[in-house]
Image (tube, grey):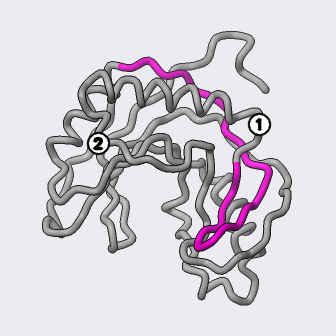
């Protein structure tokens, strides 16, 4: 059963973007936060670090709009009709590119995440919302720094979790805020797919 929050209407003139995402559980977030501080070092506060409560791995992002309530309603209707299985999502590398630094997915979780993404993309196109999708990184990743200088790339001790929920948020562009709209539980995997 979907758990849905009532959206607020603050900053209606601002741009908003719906995002479907996976949120890490508290123990994983704690580990990621320590890694974030280790990587940032003395320059941590100048690197625009992503705040712990906003850690996530994007499943599917949509374009920015001024008024997105009708789109949010349609997304909720579409996702509610899908059957998505839980899966393992893990990371084993810190990667740094121009103006971005974060974690890259491990091979064990990439295929499963890609399969869930394809299901979501196909469902949105079938419902006539394909032109509302944002083109972006499809490989699983978790952004830790925005607008950061190059921080290097290096392997890390593998960290991950079994994703059990899909969350829809409204991203308030320019305000650094995520507003939860709805969440759906993912079904248990078939026997034999529980562990990687």
Q: Is residue 70 left or right of residue 90?
A: left
In the image as oriented, which residue stretches furthest toward the top? 191
Q: Secondary structure at mark 2?
A: helix
Disc 2 crowd, CA 10 A, few/some/many (<14, 14-19, 20+)? some
Q: Quadrant of residue 48?
A: bottom right
Q: Is residue 59 above or below residue 193?
A: below
Q: Position of residue 126 (x, y in %)?
A: 30, 21
Q: Is residue 67 left or right of residue 27?
A: left
What is the chief secondary structure element of the magenta stretch?
strand
Q: Residue at x 53, y 28 (%)?
A: 116
Quarter occupied by the N terminus: top left
- Residue 137 position, x and y percent, is 55, 49
Identity of the residue drawn at 73% across and 61% down: 95
Indicate the position of residue 14 as horizontal and vertical percent values.
Answer: 20, 68
- On the image, the x and y values in percent for residue 6 come to 20, 48
Above or below, comparing residue 180 to residue 85 in the picture: below
Residues 46 and 29: in front is 46
Residue in the foreground of this view, choosing between 175 and 186: 175
Q: Residue at x 69, y 88 (%)?
A: 43
Q: Which mark is residue 107?
A: 1
Residue shown at the point (69%, 10%) measured from the top left: 191
Look at the image and say whether residue 96 sits in the magenta stretch.
yes
Which residue lies under the disc numbered 2? Answer: 132
How dense is the environment of label 1, judged by Cα within 10 Å: few (below 14), some, or many (20 and up)?
Answer: few
First of labels 1, 2 by sequence position: 1
Left or right placement of residue 6 versus residue 43 in this view: left
Between the C-alphas of marks 1 and 2, the distance is 29 Å
Stretch in magenta:
82-104
Is residue 160 placed above or below 189 in the rendered structure? below
């Amino acid at each position: 059963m979907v758990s849905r929050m009532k959206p607020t209407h603050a900053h209606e003139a601002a741009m908003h973007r719906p995002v479907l995402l996976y949120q890490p559980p508290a123990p994983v977030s704690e580990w990621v936060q320590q890694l974030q501080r280790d990587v940032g070092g003395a320059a941590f506060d100048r690197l625009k670090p992503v705040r712990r409560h906003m850690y996530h791995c994007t499943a599917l992002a949509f374009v920015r709009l001024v008024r997105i309530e009708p789109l949010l309603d349609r997304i909720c209707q579409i996702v509610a009709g899908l059957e998505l299985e839980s899966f393992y999502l893990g990371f084993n590398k810190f990667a740094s590119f121009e103006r971005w630094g974060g974690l890259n997915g491990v091979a064990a979780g990439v295929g499963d995440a890609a399969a869930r993404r394809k299901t979501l993309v196909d469902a949105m196109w079938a419902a006539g919302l394909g032109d509302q999708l944002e083109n972006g990184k499809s490989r699983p990743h978790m952004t830790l720094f925005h607008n950061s200088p190059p921080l290097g790339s290096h392997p890390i001790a593998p960290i991950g979790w079994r994703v059990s929920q899909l969350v829809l948020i409204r991203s308030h562009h320019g305000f650094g805020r995520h507003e939860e709209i709805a969440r759906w539980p993912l079904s248990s995997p078939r026997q034999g797919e529980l562990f990687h």
